[in-house]
Every structure is written in C-alpha cells, then in structure tokens.
Image: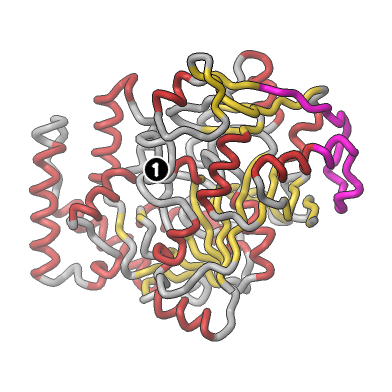
C-alpha cells in the first residue's frame, strides 16, 4: 500500500505530527521533495523534536526511513540533525535510514547564492529561508548538480573536473555578479569529503529498495514538505518552493514512478497560517491576529519566523485538497480555537466589487482581493481529552462538518492536541 500525506495550504499544517501518528501502521516513510527549508515538529513521549531533512518516521525504531531522489540534501545539516537525534537516544543506522543515490546535494555556494539574491531583492524578496533551495534546484535543471552517488567518485579525475567546471560557472554569478569571494575548490572538495564519508553507508538505490518493499506487501508512507500552495506549478507562484509539493509527484520523488498511490491524506489546520512572503488573502491583523498566533504557537519550525495567521480559508483549502487529490482530510489544531467566542471563516474573496468563490491563479488578484468573513459559534471549553467525535461540543462537531462540506472531502482525523494520543478518528 502506498499512501501520501501532503499539506493542502501554505505549509505548516501539521504533517509531521500526522506522519508520526500514522507511521505506527507503516513499514517505510519516505520524504520525496524539498530540503532543510522547512521543519516538521513532532511531540511524543520523549519530548519535542524538530525535523528538517529526516522523515518523521525516524522516531519509530521499527520504521525504515528514506530520503528520495526528489530531495535536495544539505549534507552538513543532515549530519548535524542526525547527531542531535542520536544524542537524544534515537536510533539511526543504515538499516533504518536510506538516502537515494540520485538525490542532489545542496552545497555552501547554493546557500551563499540564495542569501546574496534575497539581499539584492531587498523589499521585493520572495521570502526565501536562505537555505540554498532555489539555487540547488536550478542547478539540477541546469544539469550542473552534484548528486549523492558522486560521493563515491570524489577521487576520480572525472569528478574533480566536474567540480572545477561547476565552481568556474558559479563564480560568473557569485564573484562577478554579487561581488562574493571566488569559490575555493579545496574548500568545496573538503566539504564533500568530510560529510560524504559519514553519509556514504546510508546511500543506495532507494528506488530498488522501495520497489521490492511494495512488491513484498510493505506499507509505504510518503511525506511531503510544505503545502499545495507552495507547489512550484500550482502554488502562489513565484512565492512558492522550488519543487513539486503535491502528492502526485510523490512516487516520482520517492524513486518509484512505476507505482500508483492508493491513498492521499490531505492535512489542513482548523484555521490558516503562512510563513514567508506572498499573498495571504485571509490574513487577520491587530489583536485578533496576534492572539491567534500566540495561542497557536505559530512560529516557523525551521526558521523561528512568526507566521501570519487567518481564519479557515475555504477557497484556498478546497483548491489545495483538489490539487493534492486528497481522499480524506486530517484536520489539525482544532483545540487552538477553543478560546474564541466566534470563529472566523473566510468564505469568499472580493476584488473590485466582484465576489470570487474559486482560488485564483493571478498573484495580482490575490494581492488585491479582500476576505469575506463569516463567523461560527465557538465552544469555549477544553477539548484535548476528547477521543470520540461524539465527545466534542456540538459547536465543534458542526464546525468540522462544515469544513467537510466546504472542501468537498471527508474528514478522517481531528487533532485536539500536540501529543500523539490527542486525536480523534472518525
């Protein structure tokens, strides 16, 4: 069985929490795109963990975790992340962590280029996390990338020539364009050698591994990063990530394009949040927004940046569920709304006097649109101990049923707290 867990909104929907919860039912968890530009927060009986590159299944000893070919891997960051988890007693061996030999390596010059361009853009910046993600994906499609398989070829004349050619090309941008120091061959080679030697035992043809696992009847869970509205094709372009965050890309980015998805679980919050730049039509400001941000602890797991917040956005969520091909929805952070007398829901946009009921592709339309809000009765009580849908207050039940109808997808899971056991299965 091949299942994908994917965000339906701007990211930060709680995918890590749901992967950690559901991974108990799966044999393998795979990250299929992105890099260390986002964080998945997981809280379990051992405490709070923030994962950037490693799949959330790494916190379960009997689950095999895979970094797929669609990922871009900062090898220094990965080694540091592994060391942090090892220091907290998490098991990480080549038996439970496998890295695709076709995954692309994010190099220090990618980070430098990312930072230099965001600095040049100033107030017109795209909101990059400055982790080098856009430049490394650009290099992949420029056919200039270094892949994990190259770690086994570092001492060959062919690889040394390739690295020298790439650095000469990079200097056309970094040195001549941004005025940065010339890139050092020795420093980049040493970077690859130092961290590559550590990671080589984990590198393999993960496509063969996953193909065989599926054929053997293993249950495989694909874990996305960010959400549908950050997808490079279907998101709020150009304020997107540089990869395909949609579930349909999952088998490709995992390394098994010959396999089909059996189930897509779309993750969405009971309200909206967004970290970074770009249009966010449903945004709440002032005291209303500030209180929701604080109660929901809405700060980026990877960057610490305050997230922008808003009420549940029907247009964005219905569009995101459709782009993900979601069969069911996991609704997270319903408990956050327990303090509200009235719960805001953005039911439409208005632009130049015209009411919009579908999420537009135009960035200008999104920037100019105003949210049309309606308010639902709150429940004003603690719900974190609820374990059956019938245990929820009537107002909370009505809110969940409204979301099902609005996004045209059934809700299967409702998260009522951050801990593993704080959820309801419908």
Q: Residue placed at 54% from the left, 72% from the top?
A: 64
Q: Secondary structure at mark 1?
A: loop
Q: Position of residue 412 (x, y in %)?
A: 73, 55
Nearest to the observer: residue 238 or residue 321: 321
State left or right for residue 139 relative to residue 122: left
Q: Residue placed at 39% from the left, 43% from the top?
A: 241
- Which residue is labeled 1 in the image? 241
Label 1 neighbourhood size at 10 Å, few (<14), some (14-19), many (20+)? Answer: many
Q: Quadrant of residue 340?
A: top right
- Does residue 91 show up? no
Q: Residue placed at 29% from the left, 61% from the top?
A: 194
Which residue of the protein is positioned furthest toward the bottom in this rendering?
Answer: 216
Nearest to the observer: residue 76 or residue 142: 142
Q: Position of residue 66 (x, y in %)?
A: 47, 67
Colour setting: secondary structure
Q: Quadrant of residue 277?
A: top left
- Does residue 204 show up? yes
Q: Is residue 59 above or below residue 95?
A: above
State left or right for residue 205 relative to residue 95: left
Magenta region includes residue 382: yes
Q: Residue placed at 55% from the left, 55% from the top?
A: 325
Q: Which residues are magenta?
A: 373-398
If the image is split into quadrants, where does the C terminus sit?
Answer: bottom right
Q: Position of residue 120 (x, y in %)?
A: 24, 25
State left or right for residue 211 relative to residue 8: left
Nearest to the observer: residue 424 or residue 175: 424
Q: Is residue 335 above or below residue 385?
A: above
If the image is split into quadrants, where does the N terminus sit?
Answer: bottom right
Q: Position of residue 5 (x, y in %)?
A: 58, 57
Magenta region includes residue 344: no
């Amino acid at each position: 069985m091949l299942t994908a867990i994917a965000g339906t909104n701007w990211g930060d929907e709680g995918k890590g929490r749901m992967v950690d919860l559901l991974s108990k039912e799966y044999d393998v968890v795979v990250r299929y795109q992105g890099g260390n530009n986002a964080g998945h927060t997981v809280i379990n009986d051992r405490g709070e963990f923030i994962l950037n590159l490693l799949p959330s299944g790494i916190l379960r000893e009997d689950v095999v975790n895979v970094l797929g070919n669609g990922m871009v891997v900062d090898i220094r960051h990965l080694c540091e992340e592994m060391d942090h988890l090892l220091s907290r007693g998490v098991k990480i061996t080549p038996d439970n962590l496998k890295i695709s030999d076709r995954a692309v390596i994010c190099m220090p010059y990618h980070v430098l280029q990312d930072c230099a361009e965001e600095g040049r853009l100033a107030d017109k910046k795209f909101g990059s996390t400055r982790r080098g993600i856009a430049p490394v994906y650009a290099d992949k499609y420029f056919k200039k990338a270094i892949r994990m398989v190259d770690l086994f070829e570092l001492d060959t004349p062919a690889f040394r020539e390739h690295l020298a050619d790439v650095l000469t090309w990079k200097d056309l941008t970094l040195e001549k364009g941004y005025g940065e120091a010339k890139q050092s061959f020795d420093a980049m080679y040493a970077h690859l050698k130092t961290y590559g030697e550590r990671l080589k035992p984990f590198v393999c043809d993960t496509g063969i591994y996953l193909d065989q696992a599926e054929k053997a009847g293993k249950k495989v869970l694909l874990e996305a990063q960010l959400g549908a509205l950050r997808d490079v094709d279907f998101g709020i372009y150009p304020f997107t990530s540089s990869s395909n965050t949609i579930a349909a890309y999952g088998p490709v980015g995992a390394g098994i394009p010959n396999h089909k998805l059996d189930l897509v679980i779309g993750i969405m919050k009971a309200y909206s949040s967004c970290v970074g730049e770009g249009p966010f039509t449903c945004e709440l400001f002032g005291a209303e927004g500030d209180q929701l941000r604080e109660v929901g602890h809405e700060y980026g797991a990877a960057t610490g940046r305050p997230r922008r917040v808003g009420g549940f956005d029907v247009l964005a969520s219905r569009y995101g569920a459709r782009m993900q091909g979601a069969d069911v929805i996991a609704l997270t952070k319903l408990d956050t709304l327990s303090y509200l007398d009235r719960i805001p829901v953005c039911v439409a946009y208005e632009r130049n006097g015209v009411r919009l009921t579908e999420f537009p592709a135009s960035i200008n339309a999104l920037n100019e649109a105003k949210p049309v809000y309606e308010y639902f009765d709150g429940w004003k009580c603690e719900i974190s101990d609820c374990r059956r849908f019938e245990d929820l207050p009537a107002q909370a039940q009505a809110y969940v049923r409204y979301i099902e109808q609005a996004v045209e997808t059934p809700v299967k899971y409702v998260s009522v707290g951050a801990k593993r056991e704080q959820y309801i299965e419908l």
